[in-house]
Image: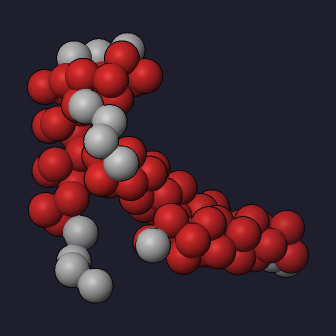
Amino acid sequence: MHGKSSRAAIRAALEEVESADTVQARISAGRRLRRAAEQLELDLVQEAREAGLRWSDIGELYGTTKQGVQQRFRRRDKETPAP
């Protein structure tokens, strides 16, 4: 599952933020942390869909419609390269 690799990337980026010795290095690590968190979110939504959760259920979690989450996550899914 991609979720495990996303969590590992988050841990690594957090360690980089904490150990960085320059502002530039912390910013760079912070950007990697944000990207890893976004990937984890995408992975979790994909896992939820594979487990049978409906788009409307996911939309409710985000306080939006099923169409809103479909647009948000289907679009990002198409941008994500295949493993």
Q: Is residue 3 left or right of residue 46?
A: right
Residue 61 percent coordinates (x, y): 43, 22
Q: Quadrant of residue 54?
A: top left
Q: Is residue 50 left or right of residue 38?
A: left
**In percent of the image, x 54 and y 76: which residue is there?**
5
- Looking at the image, can residue 45 be seen? no
Give the position of the N terminus as an image quadrant.
Answer: bottom left
Marker count (numbered): 0
Q: Is residue 15 left or right of residue 44?
A: right
The way the protein has been coloured in the rendering is secondary structure
**In percent of the image, x 30 and y 42: which residue is there?**
52
Give the position of the C terminus as an image quadrant.
Answer: bottom left
The residue nearer to you, when weighing 82 against 30, is: 82
Residue 56 percent coordinates (x, y): 24, 22
Q: Quadrant of residue 73?
A: top left
Q: Seen from this angle, which residue lies furthest bottom? A: 83
- Looking at the image, can residue 75 be seen? yes
The residue nearer to you, when weighing 52 against 41, is: 52
Residue 22 percent coordinates (x, y): 78, 74
Q: Is residue 40 above or below residue 32?
A: above
**In percent of the image, x 80 and y 73: which residue is there?**
15
The residue nearer to you, when weighing 30 against 79, is: 79
**In percent of the image, x 24 and y 69: which residue is there?**
80
The residue nearer to you, when weighing 19 against 49, is: 49
Residue 3 percent coordinates (x, y): 50, 65
